[in-house]
Image: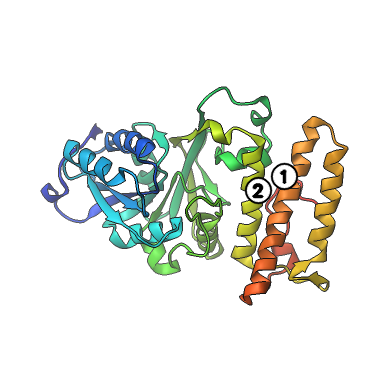
Amino acid sequence: MASDHQTLEQRSGVVDITLIVCTYNRCSSLAKTLEIIAASKVPNSIAWEILVVDNNSTDETRSVVAYLGRRFPGRFRYVFEGQQGLSCARNRGIRESTGEILVFTDDDVTAEPDWLWNLTSELRGGEWAGAGGQITPLWSGPPPKWVLTTDTNITGPYAVFNMGPEPVELKRPPYGANMAFRREMFARYGDFRVDLGRSGTNLQGREEVEFANRLLAAGERLRYEPRAVIYHTIPRCRMCKRYVLKWWYWYGRSEIAESGPPKSRWVVCGIPLAFLRRVLRWAAQSVFSTDRQRLSCQIFVFYIAGMAVACYELSRSGNVRMASLSGVAGTHIKGAPE
């Protein structure tokens, strides 16, 4: 394998891989990310492109892509998507892409030189619908001791994804910073839901989770590739408990947006009374907990509060679809309160 900077026009046939990078006002980190992945080691026989989708950036994003386009002729394409939201940007990337395999990563990551090929090589045979790789946090400073844990309630907000050293079939969705799907999956099952995913500075998510769950529910197979390693930069502003709690609040909102409020006999302003009881219970318990336990209790409070707020807003809008109580309300958080 070798780094290949041939122009797409010099190749025959279709493009094999389109790498889609959606970005919003992160030109500094974007420049580093694009420069690293542009030098990826991919076989000379593989035609690939990097498609940057600018989602309303007001910084120097376009200039950064233009500069790198001159450094790596034929490797980059730039698209502007004016409708705000990560799902809108990803869906625009799907429409504009030319690859048979579509890869997604973030605008603040670094990658191993062979990451792209390791992630996609097994998708070419048709056995797998998609793949996800390992995501390792790259701390911007010494992480606080409470972050260095195996508790997924704490590592989840930092997109840590590690299923072990061996390739396995995934029974759960991969994360958006390191995932790839065969193009036909979007034609068959639809795009990312635009009512999910980040928009501007909020932390709503689950758009990639919902899409991958559609594939899994249909019997499609997803692969975990441990050799496809991405390092996800964690800025200092996120290395605090406030960020973890904010992330879980938005995760709770995202679950309701995805599945709708749970069916409940007793509801106040659209909020199931069970949510209110749980918030009060875990808020009280956090007061009397040790420092080690307090964060877990607070995570439950913010998570359920997010679901409650989402239920209230849906009831006010009148756009409500009901889900079973077992379908949401705590099933995606480890040790979720009853």
Q: Residue at x 36, y 50 (%)?
A: 57
How many numbered discs, if any?
A: 2
Q: Residue at x 64, y 31 (%)?
A: 147
Residue 53 is situated, as x and y percent measured from the top left of the image, at 33, 52
Image quarter of the C terminus: bottom right
Q: Is residue 321 visible?
A: no
Q: In the displayed image of the protein, which residue is found farthest to the top?
A: 142
Q: Residue at x 61, y 46 (%)?
A: 247
Marker disc for residue 108: none
Residue hosting label 1: 299
Contact check, label 2 and label 1, Cβ < 8 Å: yes
**Label 2: how many residues lie within 10 Å, few (<14), some (14-19) or many (20+)?**
many
Specify the amino acid type for callout 1: Ile
Image quarter of the N terminus: top left
In what element is the residue under mark 1? helix
State the separation of the CA atoms marked 2 and 1. 6 Å
Colouring convention used in this rendered image of the protein: rainbow
Residue 99 is situated, as x and y percent measured from the top left of the image, at 28, 55
Q: Is residue 105 visible?
A: yes
In what element is the residue under mark 2? helix
Q: Is residue 285 left or right of residue 170?
A: right
**Label 1: how many residues lie within 10 Å, few (<14), some (14-19) or many (20+)?**
many
Residue hosting label 2: 248
